[in-house]
Amino acid sequence: MLKKIIFQIFILSFAFLTSAQNAETGGMPQLNPEFWISQIVWLVITFGILFFVLSKFILPKISNNLETRKSQILENIESAEKQREESEKKLKEFDKIIFESKNKAKNLFNDARQKVLDDINKKRAELEKNIDDEVNAAEKEIDQLKKSSHDKITKIAIETSSDLVKQLIGEEVNNSSISAIVEDLSRKNKEKHNGI
């Protein structure tokens, strides 16, 4: 960098000298060759001080700032990369949690559904058993009523017939003959109904 600055100083000096020779005829005092040595000395002193101040104070601060910014940018990039990796990890964990939650909800739903179906089937079986028991009890009652009703109907028929005969003829008739007639009629009715 120092070589570059010295090279630039010499180029500027050369350009200045050539332009000074061309401008000497115009009467400009700074282009008069008498003052060139003092001007060159002051130029070297000024640029030397400027170079010293730049190289010792300003350029180190600028390079420190650049290094600081570079390291800060690298740290930010590393931090962003870590955060990206963490966010991807969190997203995977979140997806896993959602998947597990869906599976748990599905299992709970299936368990609840199965439990409801089991309860319904159990209640249906109990209801069917109760209905079967009631039907059997009703059939037994009907059978008992059929058995007992025949005797009752026969008894009622005999009593009614004897009352009718007594009213028609005015005398009491033997219950055994009336019961034989009623029994004969009921037997014929039974055969008639069983034949159908």
Image: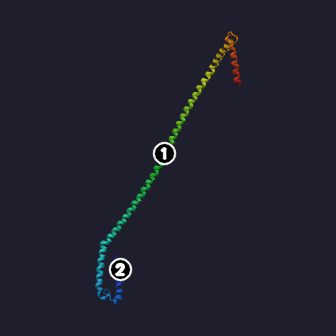
Query: Would residue 39 appear left or right of 90 to someone viewing this image?
Result: left
In the rendered image, which residue does mark 1 sit on? Answer: 105
Mark closest to the chain's N terminus, 2 or 1 = 2
- What residue sits 52% from the left and 40% below the top? 114
- What residue sits 31% from the left and 72% below the top? 58
Q: Is residue 153 above or below residue 14?
A: above
**Dot 1 amino acid type:** Ala
Please state which of residues 3 and 150 is positioned toward the viewer in this rendering: 150
Label 2 element class: helix
Q: Dot 2, how many residues are within 10 Å of its Cα: few (below 14), some (14-19), or many (20+)?
A: few
Q: Is residue 114 above or below residue 28?
A: above
Q: Dot 1, how many residues are within 10 Å of its Cα: few (below 14), some (14-19), or many (20+)?
A: few
Label 1 element class: helix
Indicate the position of residue 148 as horizontal and vertical percent values.
62, 19
Q: Which quarter of the figure has residue 5?
A: bottom left
Please state which of residues 71 and 133 is positioned toward the viewer in this rendering: 133
**Dot 2 amino acid type:** Gln
Q: Residue furthest top?
A: 171
Mark 2 vs mark 1: in front = 1
Q: Which quarter of the figure has residue 166?
A: top right
In the rendered image, which residue does mark 2 sit on? Answer: 8
Q: Which quarter of the figure has residue 126?
A: top right
The quarter of the image holding the C terminus is top right
Query: Would residue 101 appear left or right of 46 to someone viewing this image?
Result: right
